[in-house]
Amino acid sequence: MAEVLKRIKRCIIAGRVRFTFKAELEMLADNLSRTDVLESILNAQVITKILRSRRTPGKDGGERLYVIQ
């Protein structure tokens, strides 16, 4: 899991980040900016959980969602 977090952080540093509409709404509800969210991920130490999305069915069972704390 540590390698996945490193890859996520590298994507942030390279500017390869997209926020979904749902994420934008949640950030607005929590009064968070994009910078706040990206900074939190860059400072994260561990992925605590991996979930499978139910929205994107396919041969792999959907995309992976990472819970980062």
Image (spheres, rainbow, N blue to C red):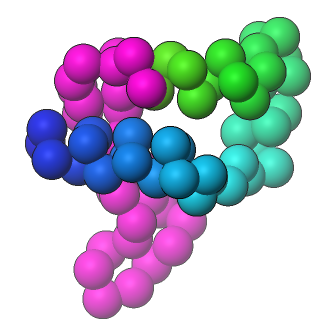
Image location of residue 61, percent across then percent down: 31, 74
Instruction: Give the tally of numbered discs.
Output: 0
Residue 9 visible to an observer of this rendering: yes
Name the outermost residue toward the top.
31
Residue 5: image quadrant is top left
Q: Which residue is drawn at 36% across and 32% down?
A: 67
Residue 50 visible to an observer of this rendering: no
- Residue 57 placement, left or right of 33: left
In the image, 14 versus 42, the foreground residue is: 14
In the image, 7 versus 25, the foreground residue is: 7
Quadrant in which the N terminus is drawn: top left
What range is drawn magenta here?
A: 42-69
> Is residue 59 depicted above or below 30 in this figure?
below
Name the outermost residue toward the front.
14
Report if residue 66 lies within the magenta region.
Answer: yes
In the image, 51 versus 33, the foreground residue is: 33
Image location of residue 19, percent across then percent down: 71, 48
> Is residue 57 depicted above or below 37 in this figure?
below
Q: Which residue is drawn at 62% across and 24% down?
A: 37
In the image, 10 versus 4, the foreground residue is: 10
Image location of residue 39, percent across then percent down: 55, 20
Q: Residue at x 24, y 30 (%)?
A: 47
Residue 62: image quadrant is bottom left
Image location of residue 34, percent across then percent down: 74, 29
- Residue 57 placement, left or right of 21: left
Quadrant in which the C terminus is drawn: top left
Residue 9: image quadrant is top left
> Is residue 40 depicted above or below 13 in this figure?
above
Report if residue 58 lies within the magenta region.
Answer: yes
Q: Residue at x 83, y 17 (%)?
A: 29
